[in-house]
Amino acid sequence: MEPFAIPFSQSVVDDLRRRLQGTRWPDQVPGTGWEYGTHLMYLKELCSYWEKEFDWERQVSSLNSFKHYKTQIDDCLVHFVHERGKGPKPTPIIISHGWPSSFAEMLKIIPMLTDPVRFGGRPEDSFDVVVPSLPGFGYSSPRRHGHMRAHERWAKLMTQVLGYPSFIAQGTDVGAGVTSLLGYFFPDCVRGIHISSVDLLWPDPLPAESELTENEKNYMTSFKKWEREENGYGHIQGTRPQTLAYGLNDSPAGLAAWIVEKFRAWSDCGGDIESRFTKDELLTTVMIYWTTQTINSSMRHYYHYTNNVNLPKRKPGGRIEVPTGVAMFPGEKDLLVPREFAERSYNILHWTDLPRGGHFAAIEEPELLVEDIRAFARKLRTS
């Protein structure tokens, strides 16, 4: 395990600005908004700010105010943030991000979790926080041939590298799947899992329609609607990610359009993306992908999942039996999972329907998310 600092390169920034200046903008159907995809005028505004005002060096300095490390786990060089808690007996927790996100999504909640007294909590609510970059995302090296198996790497990171005999896992989006698999395959060291995302594992096999409740049937209908209307990105990334990567890896405007559209569509922003995210927050995420050139390896995960390339296998009917907490944020809209459906696959100890927030809850509603994680951990301590 070696200390690591996010690098800054002026030559990379200079090249980025030249590319932004030379962007060949497409047209847009007159009178339309975001229904065709990322809005032309908004992207021009964002890219103008990116070129002329965004200070990547300042953002790198802010990122480096946290303690970063890298360590080799099997065939992957894993990047992670590790911050110690300020309390009598901090609870170890590993937090996994999703796509198109990065470890930076979690930076608002790290100090809240490590130093609860400073943010209105109790000393016993403190955590030792570990936030890795998923394999193939940001500063972790990719696994090129098959499933990234982050759950296996995270178990080794926590127990062998950092020396925690047991810990809690938390995750969203792809990270929710990683967290679920941690709970399923490593119940001896995982005390419990907390998921702040609709990306829960489904029961396998899926129950017959006659066995589903009305809420579950409505959920299946909503899910199919989302698949038709919102999952075009997933189908492309799951079938031809390499073709897409040429444009996204070469064009900063194209990369920003691909990522930012998801921050708007999946958040609780009511169509106004900057009511939830600042330009600096959006562009910091985009810059992590741009400077590391990991958009292709991040999308490759979808191909491996879609095509069942070396996926970890649960036993038929396999249920996650470690205690589970779920924070359901309303901005997830058509994908909101009913509790009875989740209980088919998870041992639910704690469930909260939050009043606001969406897919990127750690940025959108950090206080709500942190309080829910604290509440779940308290139940674990007393259960």
Image: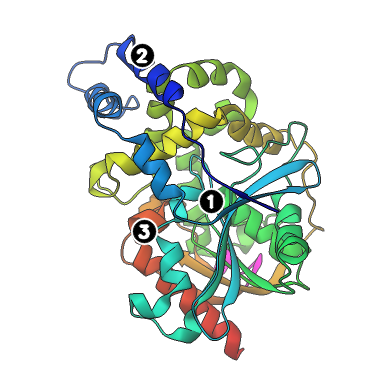
Q: Which residue is mark 2?
A: 18
Kindly identify the amino acid type of the residue bearing the numbered disc 2.
Answer: Arg
Cα separation, mark 1 vs mark 3, equals 19 Å
Q: Which residue is mark 1?
A: 97
Q: Residue furthest bottom?
A: 382
Kindly identify the amino acid type of the residue bearing the numbered disc 3.
Answer: Pro
- In the rendered image, residue 93, in percent from the top left (x then y), is placed at 59, 68
Q: Secondary structure at mark 2?
A: helix
The answer to which of marks 3 and 2 sits earlier in the sequence is 2
- Closest to the camera, between mark 2 and mark 1, is 2
Q: What is the quadrant of residue 253 in the picture?
A: top left
Q: Which residue is mark 3?
A: 330
Q: Is residue 374 left or right of residue 33?
A: right
Q: Which residues are magenta?
A: 340-347
Q: Secondary structure at mark 1?
A: loop
- In the rendered image, residue 288, in percent from the top left (x then y), is placed at 48, 36
